[in-house]
Amino acid sequence: MDLMVELRQLDINKAGDWPIVFKVIALVILFIGIVIGGYFYVWSDQIQELENAEVEEETLKTTYLAKKHSVINLPGLRQQLKDIEQSLSTLLRQLPNKSEMEGLLVDINQAGLGRGLQFELFKPAEKESINAFYAELPIAVKVIGGYHDIGAFTSDVAKLPRIVTLNDINIVPGNDGKLVLDAIAKTFRYLDDEEIAKQSIGK
């Protein structure tokens, strides 16, 4: 009860005359108030800035290490690029140009005739399918022959110097113990500079 009386008698204007206990309590409350006020009005923004700076620092470290790794491996990466360019060049050489397409069609036909197969159908599509840097020409093929002859024909087509694929293959029994092969042979050619330019304009 004496404490409550003393608290009521305290004069804020004469804080220097307060008993030591009240001075300590007042200072502690003031300190806590300053800390809380400082946190909400000053430190919270600075803490957020510090956290953002730490995140940015980690990002920069990661970027630096990635670039450092790339620089260290630069000779290897250059060699990989060179190998890829050589592989692409090799693949492009397997794609005929316009003038070579007719010869390729003859080669496919000769591969069948050379195995004694009878062609019932050999019909190139009227229109090529144009892609980014190459054109695709489907050819409807129907041949009749023995099991081993048809197998040898497909092997011969796979060994052609130019890329030819057989798709949608369907083999059914025919007459006289022969088999009938229906398939779509797809040949590819690379586009010339003029055709590539047209493709770019079309986009």
Image (cartoon, grey):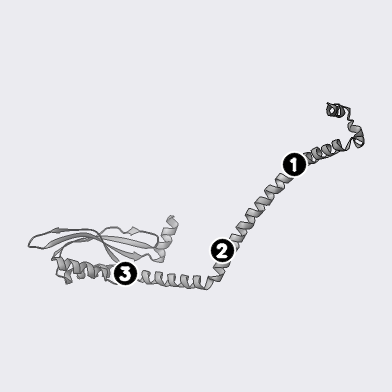
Give neighbour class at mark 2: few <14, some 14-19, many 20+ (Cα, 10 Å). few
Toward the left, the furthest residue is: 176
Residue 175 at x, y percent in the picture: 8, 60
Residue that badge 3 annotates: 99
Locate residue 25 relative to residue 57 in the image: left or right: right
Where's the C terminus, which quadrant? bottom left
Of residues 101 and 143, which is closer to you in this image?
Answer: 143
Locate residue 29 relative to residue 131 in the image: left or right: right
Give neighbour class at mark 1: few <14, some 14-19, many 20+ (Cα, 10 Å). few
Residue that badge 2 annotates: 66
Q: Amino acid at mark 2?
A: Ala
Residue that badge 1 annotates: 41
Vertical relation: 146 (above or below) 50: below
Q: SS of the residue at dot 3?
A: helix
Vertical relation: 121 (above or below) 89: above
Please name the residue shown 13% across and 62% down the image: 179
Residue 60 at x, y percent in the picture: 62, 59
Toward the front, the furthest residue is: 1
- Disc 3/disc 2 C-alpha distance (Å): 47 Å
Q: Return the disc, 1 or 3, that comes first in the chain's sequence.
A: 1
* Residue 145 falls in image quadrant: bottom left
Give neighbour class at mark 3: few <14, some 14-19, many 20+ (Cα, 10 Å). few
Could you tell me if residue 106 is visible in this image?
A: no
Vertical relation: 96 (above or below) 57: below
